[in-house]
Image: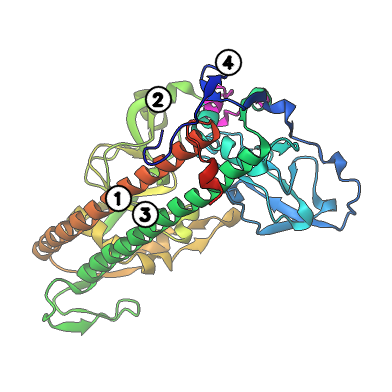
Amino acid sequence: MPSGTYTPYPRYKDSGVEWLGDVPEGWEVKRLRFISRINPLASELQDFSPEDEVSFVPMECVCEYGGLRLEQTKPMDEIGSGYTYFRDGDVVFAKITPCFENGKGTLAEGLVNGVAFGTTELHVIRPDDTLEKRFLFYLTICDNFRKIGESEMYGAGGQKRVPTDFVQNFPVPLPPLPEQAAIAAFLDRETARLDALVARKRRLIELLQEKRAAVISHAVTRGLDPAAPIKDSGVDWLGEVPAHWEVKRLAYLAEMSGGMTPDKSNETFWEGDIPWLTPKDMKRPVIDDTEDKITHVALTATGIKLYDAGHVFIVVRGMILAHTFPVCINSVETTVNQDVKALNVLRYFIPQYFAFMLQGIDKALLALVEEAAHGTRCLRTEVWHDFYVAFPDKDEQLKIVSELEKHITRIDALITKINTAITTLQEYRTALITAAVTGKIDVREEGAC
């Protein structure tokens, strides 16, 4: 229960539901199917004509813990049977992993013509007149609803889903309607306050990340000595560089090789102890583990290459290249998938500097990225090989790496501290919602403020 000035209700009674415990006197407990319609059918839309526009909502437009991005519309005659129907005032949430666990869900508002069709991976709850819609929304993002729903998911691997009967039979702690409205108003105000705090902290992280990028970029394009003589590099994007630095094509600086995806349907290939690096793992500068791992059976059967520690890795295919150029070094042996390339730096470089260099010139590298089939992005090998960079000798590289590591360690420590504070605020937000909608704290007067 959140600490602070919130007090419990004066009197409680047993709810009859083990996880819920006691609820305030005057509250009822009803299963959701008795106070709402679950997944209503689109057949009720008899008054719509074929050309009428409605909102169209793919999963990526359903926000976590509230909000829809209403960027797309479709006429009714383009809507087939393979979509989920909902309308203004409905509460919708993702039913598939990991979207459900991540809190994707919202109260639908502002839909075009009051109606939307979206991904089939949504459950829809339409409250009746005994259930306040905002109170219902907060109930669906409280800890109990999410954790119990997660425990009842069915299916295998990434295809687990929350069953409809979980939604239908979920016991709702139900205060009188005016009290529901007061609780919802309190949560509207408090979550907005907490969200504003989180937004300010995230902006601070963005500024620190910009500073981090600027420090790296300056060091790997101008060096550490501001008084060093400079020269024209002869390369448009580079401009002037320190006079003693060399300028060469990437083809002469690192050997590039790749990887593959072993057969996903072969169980003997997976859940092993050999790291398998994919773009989703490349959020850290040094890789010591990966989300997925392959077995020695896969290594032998497929011939996938195992890379020693000290290689530099880049992403060469994927939508992430629309905005980010991921770079990392491995500290353990690893394999890679086909969207990642391993770079074995040649005699001109130490790997740590090469990785910093790529991070520091990421905007220039992103300019080389092209749109490939199905709209994804790719960096072609021949384009990479033909790209020119400037660099110092190894002694100067070591000095630059040492100086960068000092600066970056300080910046990363600040970012970690702020992220910890954000996590604490988010945990408090969840706890506050859960305590309010289950009657563990009395916020009736707070909601009237």
Look at mark 1 in the image and give the residue it sits on.
Answer: 328
Q: Residue at x 39, y 59 (%)?
A: 200
Going from N to C along the chain, the mark reached first, 4 or 2, is 4
Q: Amino acid at mark 4?
A: Gly
Look at mark 4 in the image and give the residue it sits on.
Answer: 16
Judge from the rendering whether residue 53 lies leftward or rightward of residue 393; answer left or right.
right
Asked whether residue 359 is drawn in magenta, I would say: no
Q: Quadrant of the N terminus?
A: top left
> Label 3 vs label 4: CA separation?
52 Å
Number of the front mark, 4 or 2: 4
Residue 272 occupies quadrant: top left
Going from N to C along the chain, the mark reached first, 4 or 1, is 4
Asked whether residue 156 is drawn in magenta, I would say: yes
Q: How is the image coloured?
A: rainbow
Q: Amino acid at mark 1?
A: Cys
Residues in magenta?
148-165
Q: Amino acid at mark 2?
A: Glu
Q: Amino acid at mark 3?
A: Pro
Q: Position of residue 130 (x, y in %)?
A: 72, 35
> Label 2 vs label 3: CA separation?
25 Å
Going from N to C along the chain, the mark reached first, 3 or 4, is 4
> Label 3 vs label 1: CA separation?
7 Å
Going from N to C along the chain, the mark reached first, 2 or 1, is 2
Q: Are marks 3 and 1 in contact (CB under 8 Å)?
A: yes
> Label 4 vs label 2: CA separation?
42 Å
Going from N to C along the chain, the mark reached first, 2 or 3, is 2
Judge from the rendering whether residue 234 lies leftward or rightward of residue 77; answer left or right.
left
Look at mark 2 in the image and give the residue it sits on.
Answer: 271
